[in-house]
């Protein structure tokens, strides 16, 4: 087994702004595992909000190299468990490794990942397309540039309702809104009434993750369902979100990969919660991995590669209502 760590820059089509950051490009780390001529690829992006950098991802992976390149593991779950303590502070690096391990493992078996998981690719929900915060005119222009049946609108400004009112004038698509922790409970409850009338499907993470009392109020009085994101990072968070949110958005990079992500989704389903997986502006490597587990989901946000001006990889092809997987086993992504 040979481990390689590659660093790539992903240029964005537009400046991408959410409540706490803006960026024009995205650094990403690619993990490449090779054994007997078979290659597995995984990916995780850097993230300043969570303190994740290229250097600390490379350092974490270097610390795990001896285990990764050993014969101590056969399955991705075994590798995840063996390296859990090493990646405790860097789940993003663990995600890239775990994803590559799943790609390699299923390639060695000669089957696609969704086949190994006994999932039906015809059951994949339509991804939303994300519109980042900008001037209202530019947000309208971005929406018109890519006509899509579901948009996720990033909010967290002092004129959030004005944004949705104006966007609604230009589209009959379903809207989902993501405030990225920017609102108070009173705002979320008040806004939910008009947002419901404007055909908004749900609100994602309206409050700061530690505002538990506020979320109790929002959960009880909001006219819209609320989906946890920043409040649901690791496996133990799922149960904590029950009774505060109607569903969870699992980010594989935050959770530590596909292995814990699957456990989180199954736990949410057992609790009667809606399930979603979101992306972090990855290339087609990370997006392809999400697509394979998407049949488990009620909602999916896997538009990351669609937001790039240049993709470093090829993989799944996504159009409204249909995801086409490349021929061959594994995740199906390859570096260009």
Image: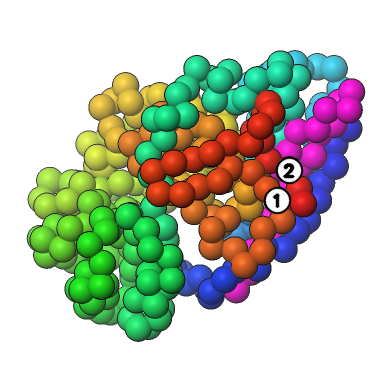
Q: Residue at x 88, y 32 (%)?
A: 2
- Please state if 233 lies on the left or on the right of 154 as rendered: right
Which residue lies under the disc numbered 2?
334
Visible residue check, residue 81: no
Determine crowd level at label 1: few under 14, some 14-19, many 20+ residues with C-alpha closer than 10 A: some
Mark 2 and mark 1 in contact (Cβ < 8 Å)? yes
Question: Residue 189, relative to residue 216: is it above or below?
Answer: below
Task: Give me the residue at 60% from left, 59% from top.
Answer: 47
Q: Which residue is painted at 68% across and 48% down in the image?
A: 314
Q: Nearer the viewer, residue 282 or 123?
A: 123
Residue 222 at x, y = what percent? 14, 52
The disc at residue 160 is none
In this picture, which residue range is highlighted in magenta?
24-44
Residue 135 visible in rendering: yes
Give the quadrant of the N terminus: top right
The image's colour scheme reads rainbow
Q: Which residue is mark 1?
A: 313
Say how many tags the image has: 2
Magenta run includes residue 43: yes
Query: Which element carries disc 2, helix, strand or loop?
Result: strand
User: Which mark sits nearer the N-terminus, 1 or 2?
Assistant: 1
Query: Is 9 contained in the magenta span?
Result: no
- Disc 1 versus disc 2: distance between alpha carbons? 5 Å
Q: Position of residue 51 (x, y in %)?
A: 61, 58
Mark 2: few, some, or many residues within 10 Å (few <14, many ≥20)? some
Q: Horizontal and vertical percent for residue 36? A: 89, 23
Above-or-below relation of 41 to 56: above
State the image coordinates of residue 96 (x, y, percent, origin top left): 68, 41
């Amino acid at each position: 087994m040979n481990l390689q760590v590659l660093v790539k820059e992903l240029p964005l089509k537009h400046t991408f702004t959410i409540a706490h950051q803006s960026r024009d490009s995205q650094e990403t780390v690619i993990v490449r595992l090779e054994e007997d001529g078979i290659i597995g690829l995984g990916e995780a992006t850097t993230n300043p909000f969570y303190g994740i950098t290229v250097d600390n991802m490379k350092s974490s992976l270097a610390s795990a190299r001896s285990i990764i390149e050993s014969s101590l593991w056969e399955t991705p779950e075994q590798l995840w468990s063996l390296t859990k303590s090493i990646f405790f502070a860097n789940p993003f690096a663990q995600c890239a490794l775990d994803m590559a391990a799943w790609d390699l493992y299923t390639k060695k078996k000669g089957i696609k990942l969704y086949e190994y998981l006994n999932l039906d690719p015809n059951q994949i929900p339509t991804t939303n397309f994300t519109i980042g915060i900008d001037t209202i005119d530019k947000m309208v222009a971005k929406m018109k540039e890519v006509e899509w049946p579901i948009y996720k609108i990033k909010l967290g400004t002092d004129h959030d309702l004005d944004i949705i009112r104006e966007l609604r004038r230009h589209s009959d698509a379903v809207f989902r809104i993501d405030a990225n922790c920017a609102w108070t409970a009173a705002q979320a409850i008040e806004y939910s009434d008009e947002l419901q009338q404007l055909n908004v499907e749900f609100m994602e993470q309206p409050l700061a993750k530690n505002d538990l009392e506020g979320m109790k109020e929002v959960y009880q009085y909001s006219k819209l369902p609320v989906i946890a994101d920043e409040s649901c990072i690791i496996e133990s968070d799922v149960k904590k979100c029950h009774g505060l949110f109607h569903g969870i958005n699992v980010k594989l990079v935050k959770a530590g990969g596909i292995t814990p992500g699957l456990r989180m989704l199954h736990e949410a389903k057992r609790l009667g919660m809606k399930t979603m997986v979101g992306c972090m502006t990855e290339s087609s490597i990370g997006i392809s991995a999400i697509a394979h587990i998407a049949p488990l989901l009620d909602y999916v946000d896997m538009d990351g590669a669609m937001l790039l001006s240049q993709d470093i990889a090829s993989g799944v092809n996504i159009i409204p209502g249909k995801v086409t997987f490349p021929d061959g086993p594994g995740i199906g992504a390859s570096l260009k």
